[in-house]
Amino acid sequence: MKTNDQIVSKTLRTCRKGHHYYKSSDCPTCPICEQERKPASGFQALLSAPARRALENNGINSLEDLSNYSEKEILAFHGMGPGSIPKLKAALTEAGLSFR
């Protein structure tokens, strides 16, 4: 049971595209837009939205781009967690590539 100190209030927000959603954090990302952006296939489809954005924000859009980085460098990206590394490793291996 939550006490009053543990109750997190969510605020109604509207994104630039007009989607309405509730969020309790200061994160400006619209979850509806993120779901629409999620790739249906490819290595990025395996990742969470923060991990996908971490790669995109660092110019990594292909497995070839990814293979130019070490695991340690990828983990240093904001939004990238350790759970994504095995997925990325498997995708690289399947393509005949590896981390630097």
Image: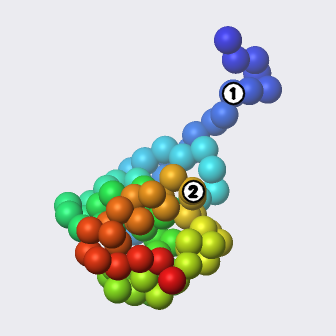
Foreground of the two, 9 or 91? 91
Which image quadrant for residue 61? bottom left
Give the residue drawn at x 45%, y 57%. 86
Q: Position of residue 7 (x, y in %)?
A: 69, 27
Q: Quadrant of the N terminus?
A: top right
Residue that numbered label 2 is attached to: 82
N-term-proximal mark, 2 vs 1: 1
Closer to the eye: label 2 or 1: 2
The label on residue 27 is none
Q: Position of residue 59 (x, y in %)?
A: 45, 87
Amino acid at circle 1: Ile
In this picture the colour scheme is: rainbow
Specify whether residue 7 is in view. Answer: yes
- 10 Å crowding of disc 1: few (<14), some (14-19), many (20+): few
Is 6 left or right of 57, judged from the image as shown?
Answer: right
Label 1: element kind: loop
Give the residue drawn at x 63%, y 50%. 25
Residue that numbered label 1 is attached to: 7
Specify whether residue 19 is in view. Answer: no
Q: Position of residue 33 (x, y in %)?
A: 34, 61
Q: Is residue 97 above or below residue 82?
A: below
Is 76 left or right of 29, judged from the image as shown?
Answer: right
Is 33 left or right of 22, judged from the image as shown?
Answer: left
Q: Position of residue 52 (x, y in %)?
A: 42, 67
Label 2: element kind: loop
Which image quadrant for residue 95? bottom left
Amino acid at circle 2: Pro
| Real-space Cα separation, disc 2 to disc 1, in angstroms | 29 Å
Q: Is residue 44 above or below residue 56?
A: above
* Residue sticking out furthest to the right: 5
Give the residue drawn at x 56%, y 72%. 71
Decide: marks 2, 1 in contact (CB < 8 A)?
A: no
